[in-house]
Image (cartoon, helix red, strand yellow):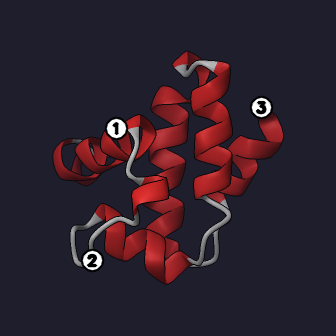
Amino acid sequence: MKRLMFRAHHMGSNENDILFGGFAEKYLASLTPEQVDRFETLIAEPDTDLFNWVTNKQDVPAQYDHDVMAMIKKFVQNEAART
């Protein structure tokens, strides 16, 4: 879990470090093992794609359009600006 938290805070772009790191700080401990796996797979994708998906600049590919993506998008829209 510590490795994944580190990765979420060191993704490559400052924007994603803030968005995904903030999400991980708040929610990673409460995710199911399956959700943790989906999160880990998701953050392995290119920074630009991730940023565009969570900010609704591009549609999320079907394989990543799951519960964890919905949680991240909700976090970005409602909470990230406050963290």
Q: Quadrant of the N terminus?
A: top right
Which residue is painted at 31% across and 42% down in the image? Answer: 70
Quarter of the figure with the C terminus: top left
The residue indicated by pointer 1 is 71
- Horizontal and vertical percent for residue 57? 22, 77
- Amino acid type, mark 1: Met
Q: Is residue 54 above or below residue 24?
A: below
Foreground mark, 1 or 3? 1
Instruction: Measure the alpha-carbon separation of dots 2 and 3.
Output: 29 Å
**What is the three-letter code of the residue carrying label 3?**
Met
Residue 39 sits above or below residue 19 on the image: above
What label sits on residue 1 in the rendered view?
A: 3
**Location of residue 71 in the rendering, given as x and y in whole percent from the top left corner:** 34, 38
| Relative vertical location of residue 12 with respect to residue 73 in this rendering, above or below | below
The residue that appears at 74% across and 44% down in the rendered structure is: 4
Q: Which residue is mark 2?
A: 58
Q: Quadrant of residue 47?
A: bottom right
Most extreme residue toward the front, as rendered?
62
The residue at 54%/35% (across/down) is 25
Q: CA distance from mark 1 to mark 3?
A: 18 Å
- Label total for image: 3
Side of 61 where 14 appears, left or right: right
Q: Residue at x 64, y 33 (%)?
A: 36
Residue type at mark 2? Gln
The residue most toward the left is 78
Question: Where does residue 43 sit, x and y in percent of width and height?
Answer: 61, 59
